[in-house]
Image: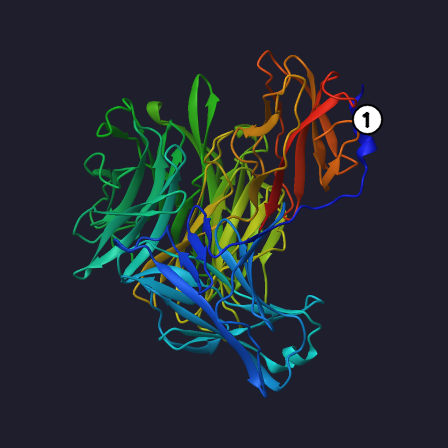
Amino acid sequence: MNIHRLSVASLALASTLAAQHEPSIGIEQPTYAAEFTPEHVDFRATAADAGDAVPNLQLRFLGARRTGWVARLRAPHQTPVRQQDRQHDDVRYDHGDVVEAYRIDAAQIEQSFHLASRPDGHGDLVLSIGAAGNVVASACSAAHRDLQFRCEGRAAIRYGEAIAFDRTGERIDVRTSYDGQGLIELIVPAGFVDRAVYPLVVDPTVSPLWSLSPSGPDRHPDLAYDNGTNRYLSVYSYNFGGSWSVRCGIINGGGPFSTANVETGLTSQPEPAVASCRCVTPDSFLVVWQQNGAIRGRLIDTYTGGSVAPSFLINSPGPGELCQRPTVTSVDSVGMVVAWDLTFTGESSPRSIRSRELYWSNPANPAGVTVGPQHILQTVATGYVQNARLSKGSHARFLSGGNWAHCRLVWERFYTQPSPGDFDVQTCSYRARPQTAQFSILQAATSVQAAAQIGDNEWQPDIGSVASTFQDPTDQRYCIAWNSEGDLYAHLYDDNGPVGSVFTIRATSSDESQPRIGAGSCEFTIAYTEAPSPTSTQLDVRAARVLRNGTVPANHVLVDSQGNALRDGLAISSRPIRLAHPNTSNRTLIAWENSSTLDGVIARQFEPVTASMSPFGSPCPGPLGEMATIGTAGGTPYGGNVGFRLTLANAPVNSLAVLLLGDLLATAAIPGAPGCNLYVGLPVLTSLPAVTNSLGESTVMVPMPCSIPAGLTIACQWGIYAPTANAFGWIVSNDIDIQWHH
């Protein structure tokens, strides 16, 4: 019998849809939980830190109206109905004229209101939602905006800005108002209500919002991630009695924020920076800051946020000199690199970029740090240089009998001539072997291509790095991004210089600024701020993907909207490059100053393409009653995970097995194989052969490409040759559906 016999199962594909009617439906996700009851929806931000309380926002649909029309609603209490299929998980309330629906995603719930036909009357359509719970939000007039609810003084839950769209896909912004007492109103413009092709959908989202600092005024955030413990460290400057102190907090990678904060001192310590440190045991974070013109550092425990060892001096300036704005990166276990701006005696602006390497000869002794010699990376006679930024994805390479740190950094250079002068972006790269004080320049300081236009300001640079698809450090890629007169551009580099051409990140009639580059496995994430209109004085936070070839997919995502707050001081941290590690993903944490609220620094997670895995269906019995089961290993199937594997267990021993992969979903009975269903639609994309061992197990490597498109779903199922099991001669496992989505 041949596996190709499965082609006879080319029956009509039937999707399976389970409808669940329950008085109450509970949902638990990594960063939130939700309960859907006949009275309301209770959203709990389990990822937020708000003292002893778990922030909860209760939402209840109150009705819809326009002049001359009021929606006919059924009884006030409607039993929720859960609908699950292989791609979606929804909960719905059928109120009559309006259907209230919730789509369950890993990071949020997507609330929507559906109108099947045009409502009578005239004027704007107004949807009213009651808001209760232990959270509060400030009253605000109607505008296209989000609502940020607080619990015990901390930002906790975001009710996102809404849009409306019709059957043709036409979209329009919806205005949101809140009375401060528990009434949310969503207002759809009258013109769109009248011309829309129905059904019409109004679509906000509800998600956790993290406050990273206890209260304002907090500034200058920076972030880093430790893969071994699956934790981020946030650092920021805290205005304490007129001077800036450094504080930090630990964030579990799945969401919860630790209330432990560390004060590094009481003298003025502005603009801290942080990177993970894998040079000591156990893993730590290295926080660096400016203090009295010098650069100092301290190791922070990845679990508690407490100090691992006393602070230490990294660079002491000469008389009258000033070291400012440090930046730091880790180079695996080789060491750490710190760079900064240096202002000479008698000067008012920095004229030099300097750096040092740090290493620990005994990783078990965190206090035993060795600070290497100072390197001069750039010095200018006129104008000035400032805002140096190291790529946090620096890498190590084994050369000449030892591991070398390879680093690239960028900075702003201001030219005074021609008058009135302008900013350009410059970069250099070098390698160093900290344990031997060896050092060599790979590319001397030079202007970034197309970021040195006379008369235009090219500034606010940032840099991130990724290795190749197969994590080859000799194929390192850096992405350098900058702001040019309110538009964002980027250029890829390797250790020796530019690669390819300059490409556009974002260029609109509105101003874009503050690009920040994070790096996942084999692509970049960029966050930036954007004025929602050319005349706006407020800023949105947006994010997008940048592929390793310089392609920027069109899905720029709104991370946080303007509201009444100024977004500034962006920071970003992506998970580092690690093969087949369960914590590895393309997830990025983005933080910013929320300078018009009590929260100095808040943050949200962003994942440009999320991989989700859903078991589906059932296996059928083998000759000895075996129930073959499909599983996974090697982490999650994020783009670039070359270690991802699909496994087989509980199958007949020492038997031929074939892994079927297809982009069509099916539920089709297999003739001659009672109880066996084919869940992969025909034709299959590929089939991968294997052989089970003496335990009835097998595994197949399924390397994930970098550029996986959002919206793709792949069904995965094993077929096992078992000639005595049934007339068909084959049995099948259950199925796993892998979906990639925004």
Asked which quadrant contains residue 651, the reply is: top right
Please state, as top left, top right, bottom left or bottom right, where the N terminus lies in the image.
top right
**Is residue 252 found left or right of 731 in the rendered image?**
left
Q: Amino acid at mark 1?
A: Arg
Work out whether residue 217 or residue 426 is closer to the camera in this orientation and state it: 217
Asked which quadrant contains residue 214, the reply is: bottom left
Work out whether residue 359 or residue 551 is closer to the camera in this orientation and state it: 551
Vertical order, 53 against 316 (above or below): below
| Secondary-structure class at tag 1 | helix
The answer to whether residue 249 is seen in the rendering is yes
Q: Position of residue 409 (x, y in %)?
A: 44, 43
Q: Residue furthest bottom?
A: 68
Asked which quadrant contains residue 683, the reply is: top right
Work out whether residue 59 or residue 146 is closer to the camera in this orientation and state it: 59
Number of dots carrying numbers = 1
The answer to whether residue 349 is seen in the rendering is no
Q: Position of residue 256 (x, y in %)?
A: 35, 47
Work out whether residue 476 or residue 47 is closer to the camera in this orientation and state it: 47
Q: Position of residue 178 (x, y in %)?
A: 42, 75
Residue labelled with disc 1: 5
Q: Position of residue 334 (x, y in %)?
A: 38, 27
**Is residue 581 found left or right of 17 in the rendered image?**
left
Vertical order, 449 against 169 (above or below): above
Vertical order, 40 against 19 (above or below): below
Residue drawn at the location 79% of the way across and 27% of the way down: 672
Residue drawn at the location 20% of the way across and 39% of the way down: 311
**Is residue 422 found left or right of 600 in the rendered image?**
right
